[in-house]
Amino acid sequence: MMDPLLIDGRADARCHLILAHGAGQGADSPFMSAVAHALVAAGLRVVRFSFPYMVRSESEGRRRPPDREPILIETWLRVIAEQRAAHGARKRLLIGGKSMGGRIASLIADEAGVDGLVCLGYPFHPPGRPERTRVAHLSRLRTPTVICQGERDPFGNREEVAGYVLSPSIEIVWIADGEHSFKPRRASGFTPEQNLSMAADAVASFAARLG
């Protein structure tokens, strides 16, 4: 069970980016919508989808836990295959997403043979549980990757991430004073809009460098 795709941008854009949502909010959340619109303005085509549990949650009007990992992976692979069938192999294809959506994309990026991976707030560990890391596969990742991470992200802040062994294919862009959705503290001098723009600019620049 999947919602219709949310598609923004021109079908003939040189770079297509498929984005999946995080655990708690769907593809049409304010964060996902803002990111998509900012990237479309930079010339990308952005496709958003919701995992089956989120579709059921929204149709039933009650919160549901995420699907098991095999279902999340299968959903990702199906969406990638459908987009390739629809648009061919000539377009650069990037995948990624917010938090959980980006993490699952990182598990299948090499297998899927995509051109790039985009993670918006990667969940390096559960909040308050830094010992439960989700980084083992990141040391072996071959796909060019950009991770936009808030400096204060409770799922992995700047100090914690510095201690991980990550593949040289991974670039981390630190979002000033940001938390998991990049929101800064008012006293920092930064605004949510500035931080979101910083992340979108980083993704657009990454996509352009893939050539």
Image (cartoon, rainbow, N blue to C red):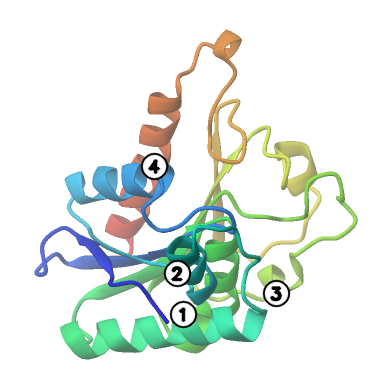
Real-space CA distance between mark 4 and mark 3, rounded to the nearest whole angstrom:
30 Å
Q: Are marks 4 and 1 in contact (CB under 8 Å)?
A: no
Mark 2 surroundings within 10 Å by alpha-carbon count, few (fewer than 14), some (14 through 19), many (20 or more): some
Q: Nearer the viewer, residue 28 or 89?
A: 28
Q: Are marks 3 and 2 in contact (CB under 8 Å)?
A: no
Q: Nearer the viewer, residue 192 or 109?
A: 192
Residue where numbered disc 4 is placed: 30
> Which numbered dot is residue 55?
2
Residue where numbered disc 3 is placed: 137
**Which amino acid type corresponds to the residue marked 1 in the rendered image?**
Trp
Residue 46 on image: x %, y %? 27, 61
Residue 161 on image: x %, y %? 74, 48
Can see residue 117? no
Dot 3 or dot 1: first in sequence order is: 1
Q: Nearer the viewer, mark 3 or mark 2?
A: 2
Dot 2 or dot 4: first in sequence order is: 4
Q: Secondary structure at mark 4?
A: helix
> Which numbered dot is residue 76?
1
**Which amino acid type corresponds to the residue marked 4 in the rendered image?**
Pro
Q: Are marks 2 and 4 in contact (CB under 8 Å)?
A: no
Q: Are marks 4 and 3 in contact (CB under 8 Å)?
A: no
Q: Residue at x 64, y 34 (%)?
A: 151
Real-space CA distance between mark 2 and mark 4, rounded to the nearest whole angstrom:
17 Å
Residue 167: quadrant of the picture: bottom right
Count the numbered circles shown: 4
Is residue 50 toward the left or the right of residue 92 in the image? right
